[in-house]
């Protein structure tokens, strides 16, 4: 086949895919027996998710994706092949506006449904009796999009070193001082950015966790009176599929960060509140009085990076502040379990993956470990008894 014949064939296939997706959730191609068996599979999948504690919305979304794949390929789950799965994923990525992470969720839903059907001996036996076939796995590690945590390890994302962190925070504060006399609409956002960046570097919060903080999420602590009413903050972190977000309390041990938060809450935020949104509870506000969101944070981060002279530094993103916080905690002697709880990781290995040791720190740790081992091998030095004092000759 010549190259000139390939493009019309591809265009015809794309048009066919579009027509197929327009018929989404259409199962008219199934026979009565196939539809009855598929309905039983869907009902069993619902019960399995309910018994596992997942929300009802997850099973609804998953079944919608499964039905769409059936309609897209005009086939049934027990006749799916890896080619069907790859064609569907390729179409979503190339011919639609669906984001990469959304396609990964679609693939996860299909994999979850298939795993249920494959693990069920009852449905596998019925499938063999009715259709003389078995349900096979079509979503593998090689044809599915990996989680962003896997992509994170493949990219050059890293932490700020000490010099870069100092330059970045100094530039954030300098941006406020330079704009302080240019009116509140310019000065107040700069003040907010400086305080927010200090909080992210100190606590290691995820960006969405920090931006979803409300005014009543902070609390005081009797052991840290110098932190005023900002000794800790309640955040809601990442959630497992079908589960609600996890709540955790994050300590704010730095009096400097606590005083910055107090200054922002008492002097900056009240000026950013708007009469159009008088009941807005968000702690981080825009000049119009609405909640500050991720798109705005990325823009302010890039501006600060440029003014700090770090725009050429590769691999630094707002998430790098979380990497920096975890690395600083571990290097300061915080044990891995405490760091895991502070930063909301399910596994300690996830926390360890955020640590970026430089060669000097690694060498220091090796020396400390070697000295401890040598001390154990040598053992305690023997304590010799005091030699008895020479006795004087008894007088005659």
Image: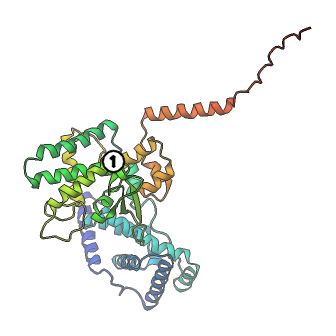
Q: Nearer the viewer, residue 139 or 350?
A: 350
Name the residue furthest bottom: 32
Q: Residue 171, position in %: x, y?
A: 21, 41
Name the residue furthest right: 396
Looking at the rendered image, the quarter that the C terminus falls into is top right
Tell me which corner region of the image, top left, top right, bottom left or bottom right, holds residue 10: bottom left
Q: What element does badge 1 sit on?
A: helix
**Residue under numbered circle 1:** 255
Q: Residue 162, position in %: x, y?
A: 34, 37
Name the residue furthest left: 182
Q: Is residue 276 above or below residue 329?
A: below
Q: Residue 78, position in %: x, y?
A: 47, 78
Q: In this view, does 186 lie above or below 44?
A: above
Q: Give the residue displayed 50% in from the left and 47% down from the top.
A: 335
Q: Can residue 241 be seen in this view?
A: yes
Q: Is residue 376 above or below residue 101?
A: above
Looking at the rendered image, the quarter that the N terminus falls into is bottom left
């Amino acid at each position: 086949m010549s190259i000139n014949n390939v493009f019309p064939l591809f265009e015809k296939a794309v048009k066919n895919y579009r027509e197929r997706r327009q018929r989404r959730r259409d199962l008219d191609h199934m026979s009565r027996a196939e539809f009855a068996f598929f309905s039983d599979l869907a009902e069993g999948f619902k019960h399995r998710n309910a018994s596992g504690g997942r929300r009802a919305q997850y099973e609804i979304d998953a079944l919608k994706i499964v039905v769409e794949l059936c309609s897209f390929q005009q086939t049934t789950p027990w006749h799916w092949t890896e080619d069907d799965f790859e064609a569907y994923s390729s179409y979503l990525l190339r011919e639609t506006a669906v984001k990469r992470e959304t396609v990964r969720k679609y693939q996860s839903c299909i994999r979850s449904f298939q795993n249920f059907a494959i693990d069920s001996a009852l449905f596998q036996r019925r499938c063999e009796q009715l259709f003389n076939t078995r349900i096979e796995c079509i979503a593998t590690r090689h044809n599915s999009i990996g989680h962003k945590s896997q992509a994170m390890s493949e990219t050059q994302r890293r932490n700020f070193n000490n010099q870069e962190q100092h330059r970045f925070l100094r530039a954030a504060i300098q941006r406020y001082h330079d704009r302080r006399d240019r009116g509140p609409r310019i000065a107040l956002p700069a003040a907010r950015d400086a305080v927010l960046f200090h909080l992210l570097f100190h606590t290691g919060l995820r960006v969405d966790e920090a931006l979803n903080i409300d005014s009543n999420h902070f609390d005081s602590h009797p052991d840290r009176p110098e932190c005023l009413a900002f000794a800790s903050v309640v955040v809601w972190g990442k959630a497992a599929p079908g589960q609600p977000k996890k709540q955790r309390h994050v300590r704010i041990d730095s009096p400097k960060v606590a005083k910055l938060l107090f200054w922002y809450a008492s002097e900056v935020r009240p000026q950013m509140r708007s009469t159009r949104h008088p009941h807005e509870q968000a702690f981080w506000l825009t000049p119009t009085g609405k909640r500050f969101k991720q798109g705005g944070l990325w823009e302010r981060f890039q501006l600060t990076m440029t003014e700090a002279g770090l725009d050429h530094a590769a691999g630094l993103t707002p998430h790098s502040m979380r990497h920096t916080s975890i690395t600083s905690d571990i290097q300061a002697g915080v044990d891995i379990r405490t760091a895991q709880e502070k930063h909301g990781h399910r596994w300690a290995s996830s926390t360890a993956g955020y640590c970026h040791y430089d060669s000097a720190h690694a060498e220091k740790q090796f020396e400390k470990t070697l000295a401890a081992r040598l001390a154990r091998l040598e053992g305690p030095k023997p304590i010799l008894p005091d030699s008895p004092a020479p006795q004087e000759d008894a007088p005659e």
